[in-house]
Image: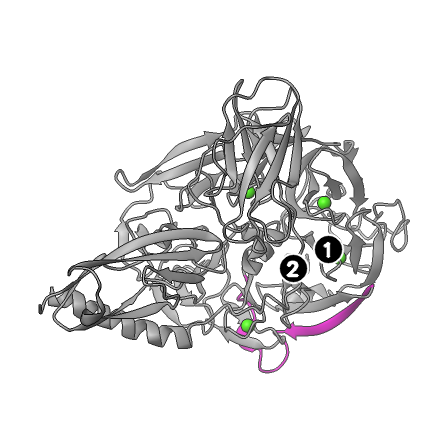
Amino acid sequence: MRHLYSRLIYFCLLFSTCEVIYAQPAYDLTKLKMEKQGRGLVAIRENDSTVNLSWRFLSSDPANLSFNVYRNGEKINDTPVRNATFFKDTHAPEKKLNYELRIINSTRQKNNQIVAWYVLEKNAPHGYLNIPLNIPSDGITPSGQNYSYHANDASVGDVDGDGEYEVILKWDPSNAHDNAHDGYTGNVYIDCYKLNGKQLWRIDLGKNIRAGAHYTQFMVFDLDGDNKAELVMKTGDGTIDGTSRVIGDPEADYRNDKGRILSGPEYLTVFEGKTGKALQTIDYIPARGNPESWGDAKGNRSDRFLAAVAYLYGEYPSVVMCRGYYTRTVLAAFDWRNGELTNRWVFDSDTPGNEAYAGQGNHNLRVGDVDGDGRDEIIYGSCAIDDNGTGLYSTGMGHGDAMHLTAFDPSSKKLQVWDCHENKRDGSSFRDAATGEVIFQVKSNTDVGRALAADIDPNVRGVEMWSLASVGIRNMKGEVVNPSIQGISVNMACWWDGDLSRELLNGTQISKYNPVTGVADRIFNCDDCVRNNGTKSTPVLAADIVGDWREEVILRTKDNRNLRIYISPHETRYRFHTFMQDPVYRINVATQNVAYNQPTQTGLYFGSDLEKIFHDNVIETSSDKITLQTAMPYDSYRWSNGKTTPAITIRKEELQSVNPTKMELEVTYRGCLLKDTVTINFLNQ
Ligand SMILES: [Ca+2]
Ligand SMILES: [Ca+2]
Ligand SMILES: [Ca+2]
Ligand SMILES: [Ca+2]
């Protein structure tokens, strides 16, 4: 039993050290301009008699806030709803239903005040919200090829300031191309729909923007803090905004006979989210220059675009437009304030001293305050660019297709990166996001095209990670915890079924890892829907869009006539603040549409270890005092002796009750109340 005590001392020492050094991300949330969120109440019919109600818990809500739910004027909950922001109405008649959400224990509003309502129509679909789509007309290319349209990636933003998201959807033509391939493409369109299905506008990017995964990266975010999201993307001559106004020369056609666009002006446009109106258009930075200077003459390298949003100075978000990652790499940051775009900085790997940053980027990127100064860095594949536009580090492991930035270790707030590499040398790597220091690496002589990180096994501490060449599932120390990933997808992930573990999302299916069998079992599938982006098998979007903290999955129907926003029907024991109030997560949603889509990740540890408040629940000691401390940092602490500090010291002589004695602790984490007890036994009586 002595080893338990020494282990406790060890953890105490570890923690007192960790808390000083590891403090990232360190956003000042009182200064950070984040969107204002509404209650996000939805009522989704599950079957003939059941309707699921789900709504947001917000960081501005008091901890003891609880809710009453009313159907057609009648209260339908027996006791106030407090442990979840989800309620299953199991006696819901099949007719038009008016649901109301009322609050109890609010400090700012009167008890039983209606804070949200939702009208559920009689013929509402089962399991999802439906958005009927306005499919663009078929077309024909200059070479005589016919093409049609399918719904592709989407983003969300509150474009009209009512506290609820709208969906901004990209339409791809059937002849969209990767940069590696020649051919004309149809025009790309961007639509905006309200969640009730109303289309607000359409932008036609015109013939001078080529269609394909690597061209149009659309950033939807409230950049100027007026609580209305803007849309920023690359445009060209002939782009038609949401109010039918043409940008640039409507007659210009820069397509060559291979359908590529390697000449002519390129623009960056900020659009008003509510109307799709072009607010300002400037010349695109980074400029194309001579395409050959990027490594080839056909635009395979010069026309590789990425984009991001980042809090570069700890207050308003900036938008970052990027060009190139196979060779030359350029990132340009812009602020949108008072109706004007200003270029904050440009990072160019061609600038002397930046050579190590060429050829390091992925087909996607991640953003977060990795070095703890409250300002975001851009994790650009194997390198990172600091908030001020200078290089932070480069590992030299080069390009890859998938990458994950999150807090893997519950014990610290430190962000780490799980990345896979194409160079048939570096395989998969796990690194410190702030320094690039490699924590472990699984080398491989193959092009490793897939990697995923998700806390799927509650028996393994921290977030698990695997790739197509990781030789199984690894824990955060690099140890193999399951030697096979057969039957376990390496793609997207979502929080779906209501427990703290993450589920796997692949194509139109959600599956759940079973730690006993070591494989994942399917728990959701939509037969009427299809996956996006070919072999990438991604949804239109997966994110916490409405309802409680669980993530919604947007899929398109096979006929492209509808988007379906699937909402979890599972009850949950937990309520957390919406993930969208975590800046790292929120930006992940904004960048999900970029090139090869990646799942959301949080900027903090989130998973099954949240409930393991103590490393050991029974502590025996031969000393006459003991210091109790939690296994991970929480937001608040309340011990059964009234103390509210993270650590407390108990002296044998202070004990009122018999020895051994039990201490209880209540903690909160993102609004969720969790409890645990620890039994202390002083051996020297
Ligand atoms: Ca809205
Ligand atoms: Ca705005
Ligand atoms: Ca930082
Ligand atoms: Ca949700």
Foreground residue, 131 or 61? Answer: 61
Image coordinates for residue 8, horizontal then vertical, percent: 23, 68
Q: Which mark is residue 227?
A: 1
Badge 2 residue CB within 8 Å of ligand 2: no
**Residue 279 in the image: above or below residue 313:** above
Foreground residue, 114 or 30? Answer: 114
Image coordinates for residue 277, horizontal then vertical, percent: 84, 50
Residue type at mark 1 is: Asn
Image coordinates for residue 470, horizontal then vertical, percent: 34, 54
Which residue lies at the image location 79% right of the left edge and 40% below the top edge? 200
Q: Which residues are magenta?
A: 339-361
Residue 673 visible: yes
Instruction: Identify the image quadrant of the C terminus.
Output: bottom left
Residue furthest to the bottom: 352
346 in the magenta segment: yes
Q: Which mark is residue 34?
A: 2
Mark 2 and mark 1: Cα distance apart in space = 8 Å
Left or right, residue 479 beside residue 463? left
Q: Residues within 10 Å of mark 2 (few under 14, many from 20)?
A: many
Mark 2, secondary structure of its residue: loop
Badge 1 residue CB within 8 Å of ligand 2: yes
Figure quadrant, ligand 1: top right
Instruction: Identify the image quadrant of the N terminus.
Output: bottom left
Mark 1, secondary structure of its residue: loop
The earlier-in-sequence mark between 2 and 1 is: 2
